[in-house]
Amino acid sequence: MRRPLLLFIVVAAGYAAGSQLSFSWFGADGTSASFFPAAGVTLAALVLVERRLWPVVLGAAAATEVLLDLVHGIGLAPSLGYAVANTVQPLVGALLLTSVRPRVDLARTTDLVAFILCAVIAGPAVGAVAGASTNAWLDGGDGWARFAGEWWVGDGLGVLVIGALILSLRPGAQASVHARRLPEAIAIAAVAAVSTWALFWLDWLPLVFVPAALLLVCGFRLDTRAVAVTGTVVAFIAAQAASGDHAYWRDLEVSPQVGLLYLQLALGVLLIAALAIAAEVGERERTAVASATAARFMEIADAAPAMLWVTDAEDHCVFLSRGWREFTGQGASEGLGFAWTNAIHSDDREAAGHGFVAASAERRAFALDYRLRRADGAYRWVIDSGRPRLGPDGAFLGYVGSVIDAHERKQAEGALTESEARLRTIFSSIDEGYCLAEMIHDAAGRAIDYRFLETNAMFESMTGLGDAVGRTALEMIPDLEPYWIETYARVASGGEPHRFESGSEAMGRWFDVFATPVGLSGQRFALVFKDVTERRRADTALRESEIAERAARRRAELTARVLGEMEATGGVRARTGRLVSLLVPQVADVAVVEMAGEESHISVASGLLPSGDPLDEGVVDRLEIRSQMVVPLDLGAGVEATLLLGLVDPERPAYTPDDVAFVGDVAERVGLLLARARVQDEERQIGLRLQRALLPDDLEPHPGVSVAARYAPASDVLEVGGDWYDAFALPDGRIGLVVGDVVGHGIVAAADMGGLRVALAALAPHASGPAQLLTLVHDFARERDPNSFATVGYAVLDASTGALSYASAGHPPMLAVSPSGATRWLAQGRSAPLCNLDVGDRPEAATVLEPGSLLVAYSDGLVERRGEPLSAGLARLEAVVRERRDGTVDEICDAVMDVLTSESAPDDDTVVLCLRLAPVDAASLSRVFPARPEELRAMRAAVREWLDAREVPREESTGALLAVGEACANAVEHAYAGREPGTVVLEMADDDDGGITVRVRDFGAWRPPTTATSNGRGRGTEIMRAVTREFVRRGDEGGTTVTLGFAPSQRVPG
Amino acid sequence: MSEPLAHVEAARDASGRVVLTVSGEIDTSNAAGLEARMADEAGAAAAGVVVDLGAVTYIDSQGLRLLVELSRRLSATGTAFTVVAPPGGFAAEVLEITSMGTLLHVVGELGGSGAPPAS
């Protein structure tokens, strides 16, 4: 906006000045139109400014014209008419001129000719027509032709003088006013001015040749600029003079108008001539210089070893030096035009061509690398550099340049340069971010930042850091983690590439970074990095899903284990116990199940409680539980329980809703298991009550024995029932002992057991012995229930003698333990269990129990253990009973149950029955010995000792010893004749009256006493009869008992 | 087996009788063995056989049978058989209880001559 205004003012002022001068010289009456400098101002302004500003120029001229005309008393209409004439005239001139010569340079002959024809002659001709018409028709003037002629000449001269002056003086025009000729130009202008002045004021016409000659001198010696200046000076002085009284024309005898016309024409012709001479001479000089220069250049260029070239403004190569021709082997003019590029390596040709054309478009210097084919066909790396050639007027003429063989240097630069360039090319095109940076250190030498020296496009798009080059990392990312700077400082100084993946919180991204030192300065490093944020997110998501999957699997396994182990356990208590112990530490550090009317089940992870701390309900309060959940357990039938889980370990993550859902799911299924267990527990209670009801409360079959028994139900609710024991007195005073096991469980088995127990007790008195009883019971059981299956051990004990007969229907053997600790398994008399099969005759066996002996009967549940042979259980039982043989039968039962069922809960019902045969009084003698003759001696020693202890008188003791000896010898000799010797039992006891009763028992064949004395045997009987007050000999198939009664001593002891 | 239950020593006295001194116990376990041994020793004697039971601590019916048997065998050859049973000893008591004095020639001491011990 400012430029048009300034232009308007400048043009208006120039026009006003030129116009006012014209008015002052020749008046404004319109009768004469003469030298009009304003016309030159307008034209020159139009030529100098762009066409879009022409309206401003023309507007300024028109407005000034109208204003001045009005001021000088010219009417509005003619004023407007003159304004039109004065705008059309330069418009036509400028249009014509600029269309043939866009950039007018008056130093060129062609431009000068165009200027004169278009601006000086054609434009003013149009203006003259318009001006004359205006004068004639609007201004009341006459003489159209004379007015037009005067206008044409006056305005033409104005354009010629002022236009040429302005156009030649404008900055940048022309090439050469040699500075040394400036004084000459000034001198010529001065002399011309003085001579012109003298011409008019001295009225000496011949002086006219002086300025004319000087103008021509100017033309020859100087340039168009000097001509224009001198011409202007002359023209102005002449115009000034002509307007005065200096009637130079009188000498010519013409009218003043004609005189003025002549003067102006002469001046114009002279000026044109001078300008033409100046232009022509200047051009010739320049041409001569240029051709001389060119010739010299080519000469030098050909002489030089370098490859030199020249192009013209159209980029055609116009010269290639001999160096080029020899190098490439191209002929003299072969490479001219564009053919020189044929010698460029085809891979480089396009890039080189582009580089050249791009530089040329901007007229700038350039340097290109390419491989050039040598005459021998080898390609060499060259550097081709060119500079623009400018004409004296600054016009672009083309390029001059040189080509240097840089192959050696290029090679020497080696792979480094090449690879660097290649790398850079790669880096700029790869998908990875790339940057080159330099560490910045503080005064102490600590790395505190780094500056980006180079980046690629991906760098910006990945980091979002635009225009990074030249700026530092902290400038761009003020809160960049120090970690990065430290890492890069290490890389830069350590010289070792480093690859790592790291995230920048400041940037919110993750990068896979390859950092490598660059150069040997220890300061530079390059980074190639990839944005792995998305991949990491995907990884994280994957990892999370893996973790979730693993957790789900672990949970499923835990669920399966909890449910499986609970199911394998019987009873609410046991199952709940399994539950809490399995949940710790898998899902909790503390697990508690609280149930109404039940002791709480608590499990605490090991190490959380000080050792010795009680595991009671206070645990939950004592432990610092950080996270907990309470889940209800529904046991059905309105039985409610709660499961509390707590976390104490600070390392463990708190419970999530997911955890709660999981535990809730487990709890639901656990609830079902517990509900089932609760029902089974109830059934078990019923079974147990029934079982207990069917077992005898009190076992006191005989005063000579003490009996105790224990029953322990199987840990598994389903296994309850079926085992029993019994001990009862038989009508003959002996004792029946039973231990049995009905196979089958639960209430039905308990009921079966009850039936068998009663049947056995009822049938016992009617059986001749254990074996027959078993047969009877077998028949009974088969009839009652063909499917029943039971094992029974039955024994009949004569408490007074210790005689024991027994039989077993598939039942494990009873154990006999003597007071001295000798043990015997009563393993004979065995037959098949009670079942739906014909078994045939069952055997039985007999033995004698030493007084004080223990008899232990039991069911298989006591000695059977999974994974170990039966013998191990039997050995354990044997050891326990032997060890505890001095205790009461109750104590022994407890000990047996304790030891044999302590290691693991019994899988089966367990029964143990323990009987002790009353021991012989401490004052009595009891001796059991094998029926062998050699045993007699020790027997007699014991008897002697016993008798001595009683201070029995000699004569009496001899008799007693003799009688006992005879009885025992008899048993030894006869009882087991022809058989494996059995035992002989000798008992001696004080009678209430001070006498002695001796009993000698054997269990061999009964042999009626003989009275024959021939072989001495009858003598034994005689002896016994002789020395005793009572002699009884009783026997049956079971053996013989001899009772000897001795009367109290006849003498007073001592 | 410990020490033998009974021990037999054979000797001849001034009158040429075989004196069998028995110590220990005699029962069914060793009676047969003793009987064989004593019959052996007595077989070569014509002047008579003396069995000294003074050191016997037990003798039962089998022991007595042995004595009766030995006595029967010697009497068949006319050899005098004497049993020495010091009064108060075990053998004397047994002999008394069984009235064996009627069947055997029992004396109270080795030097004695046929007079049975007083009862």
Image (cartoon, coloured by chain):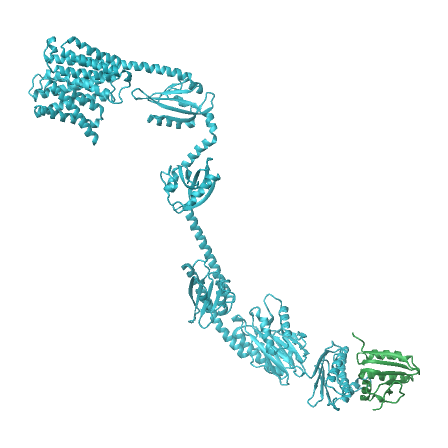
Instruction: Choose between A894 and A785: the one closer to the eye.
Output: A894
Quadrant showing the N terminus of chain A: top left
How many numbered callouts?
0
Residue A185 in picture, x, y percent from top left: 24, 15
On screen, residue A871 versus residue A32, left or right, reads right
Residue A747 in view of the camera: yes
Residue A1049 in picture, x, y percent from top left: 74, 90
Instruction: Choose between A434 and A520: the one closer to the eye.
Output: A520
Residue A243 in picture, x, y percent from top left: 11, 16
On screen, residue A486 versus residue B65, left or right, reads left
Residue A468 in picture, x, y percent from top left: 37, 38
On screen, residue A911 versus residue A13, left or right, reads right
Vertical relation: A400 (above or below) A744 = above
Question: Which quarter of the picture shows residue A12?
Answer: top left
Chain appearing in cyan on the rendered image: A
Picture colour for chain B: green
Q: Residue at x 61, y 66 (%)?
A: A868
Residue A790 in view of the camera: no
> Hey, which residue is sitting farthest front in the picture?
A443
Quadrant showing the C terminus of chain A: bottom right
Vertical relation: A853 (above or below) A500 = below
> Hey, which residue is sitting farthest left in the picture?
A140
Instruction: Choose between B72 and A258: the one closer to the eye.
Output: A258
Question: Which quarter of the picture shows residue B21?
Answer: bottom right
On screen, residue A440 versus residue A795, left or right, reads left
